[in-house]
Image (tube, rainbow, N blue to C red):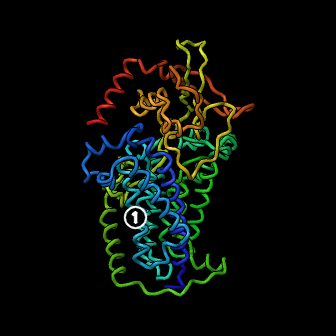
Amino acid sequence: MSDDGYWIIRLMLQRGLGVIYLMGFLAALNQFRALCGDRGLEPALPFMRLVPFREAPSLFYFLRGDRAYLLFSLLGVFLSLLAVTGISEAGGTVWSMAVWLLLWGIYLSFVNIGQTFYAFGWESLLLEAGFLAAFLGPSRVEPGWAVIWLYRWLAFRVMFGAGMIKMRGDSCWHDLTCLDYHFETQPMPNPLSRLFHRLPPPVHKAGVLFNHLAELILPFLFFAPQPVAGIAAAGSLLFLLSIIVSGNFAWLNWLTAVICLTPLDGSLIATLLAVRPPPLLPQPPLFQALTWGLVLLVAAKSVQPARNLFSRRQIMNTSFDPFHLVNTYGAFGSITKERYEIVLEGTAAEDAREESQWRPYEFRGKPGAPSRMPPFVAPYHLRLDWLMWFEAMPSQGGHSRWFVQLVIKLLQGDPQTLGLLRHNPFPEAPPRFIRALYYRYSFGDRQWWDRELVGEYLVPVSLEHPVLKQVLERYRRKLES
C-alpha cells in the first residue's frame, strides 16, 4: 500500500480540508453572533424552540447563547489549525479521528441552526468531506484506498450534479451564451471579473464548452485506471481554477478542488516532488472495520442522491439526512442576465426628503460605490453580502424578514450588525431614517461600475414606522418566550 501514492493524496486532502474548515470557523467567529446570535438578524433560539433536535442535531440545543457560539467558534479555529499543521495526525488513529469528528460535529451544530445564512450547498459539502476525513487515518498508518474512492464518488456527484442541473436549466447553457452574462451578474465579482466579462464571445462559448466537458464527461473518468483518472482530475482542477480566479464563490470551488485531488496519480506526484512515503504501520483491525462500515453507510445513503442526479426533476444542494452525510449538489442552473443591487442609505435629518443628506452603507464584498474596485474575498465567506445578492433578484417578491431586521438594527446603531459592514457612515449616532434604492449595475469604463436607478426597494422608514414597530414587538416576544 505504501507505493500506490495514496499516502500523498491523503496528505493533500487533510491539509486542504483543514484550510477550508479554518475559513468556515473564522466566518462563524466573526459573523454568527451578528447573524444568528441572541440578538442577531435571524436568532437561532426561536428556531431551536420550534424545530426538534432530531431534525436539526446541534450542540447548541444543550449549550445555548452567544457565549457558546463564541466558545465553539474558537474551538473550531483551534482544531482546524491542528489539521492544517498536521498536529492532528501526530497522536495516532484515535486522536486523528477525534479531531476530524469534532470539526464535523461542531460545524454541523452551526449549520443546522444557521437557517437562511447557512443554507448554502457548500456547507453540506464541507460536512460530508469532513466526516469522510475521520476515516483517512493518521500519516503514520497505511491509507485506506476505499476512503479515497469515496472522495472520488463525492467529486463525481459535485461535478456531474452541477453539469446536469445546467443541462436541465437555462437555455443559455445550450446555446453557449451563459458566460456573456455570468461574470458581470455573479454573486460577488472580484477585480478580474471585468476582464473575463470583456473576453470575445467566441472565448465565452469555448468556456461554456469547457464547462460541459469538465462537469459532464470528465467526472466519469475519475474511476478509470491511471493515467486516465489523473488526466481527468487535472482537467477538472484547471476548470475550477478558472472559476476561482474569475469570482468570489466562498470556498465552494476551493473545496471542490481539494476533493478533486483524489483521482490524481499519487505515485507520479511523489516522483515529481522527489518525496518518499514515511514508514507506514498497518491499520488497526477496529479502524479497518469502521472504514468498511463507512463504505456500507455511504453506499446505502447514496441511493437517493444517485437517483436525483438522473431525475428529470433534479434538485440541487439538498441533504437527505440531518447529519449531511451524503448529499446532492449543483450550481447555476440558471443565469441572471442583468445585475441589480440594493443600496442602503441613511439620513440624520428630521424629514426624509430627497434633498436630505443621505449617506450610503458600504458592504465588505458586494458592489456599492461605483468607483470601488471589487475585492478578493474567497475562500472566506461573507454571508450577509451573499444574501443581499439574493434579496436584489427581481424574482424575490418582497422583503425578507432578515432584511427588515437589518434595517432595524442599522436604525438602532447595533454594533454587531455594523461589524458586518465595511464602515459605519454614522459613527456619532444612528440615522433617523433609512431607505433602500434599487439599481441596475454593469461594468463601467471610467469607473468599476455604471449604475442606473430603477426605483426604491424600501421607502424611508424610522423606528417609529408602524410596520417596524410591529416587527420589533414580534422580535421581542420571540426572544422572551
Question: Which of the 4 quarters of the picture holds residue 108?
Answer: bottom left
Nearer to me, 207 or 470: 470
Instruction: Report whether 145 appears left or right of 446.
Output: left
Amino acid type assigned to the residue bearing label 1 in the image: Leu
282 is higher (above) or lower (below) than 358: below
Residue bearing the label numbered 1: 102
Q: How many marks?
A: 1
Instruction: Report whether 326 appears left or right of 429.
Output: left
* Residue 437 in picture, x, y percent from top left: 54, 23
* Residue 253 in picture, x, y percent from top left: 54, 55
**In this view, which residue lies farthest toward the right?**
446
Question: Which of the 4 quarters of the picture holds residue 57?
Answer: bottom left
**In this view, which residue lies farthest toward the front?**
428
Nearer to me, 309 or 273: 273
The quarter of the image holding the C terminus is top left
Residue drawn at x 41%, y 46% as measured from the top left: 119
Question: Which of the 4 quarters of the picture holds residue 343?
Answer: top right
* Residue 182 in picture, x, y percent from top left: 58, 41
Q: Secondary structure at mark 1?
A: helix
Q: Residues within 10 Å of mark 1 (few under 14, many from 20)?
A: some
Residue drawn at x 47%, y 22% as measured from the top left: 458
476 is higher (above) or lower (below) than 470: below
Residue drawn at x 62%, y 53% as measured from the top left: 242
Residue drawn at x 64%, y 51% as measured from the top left: 245
* Residue 67 in picture, x, y percent from top left: 40, 50
Query: Is residue 440 at least partly visible in the picture?
Result: no
421 is higher (above) or lower (below) than 224: above
Query: Is residue 250 at least partly visible in the picture?
Result: yes
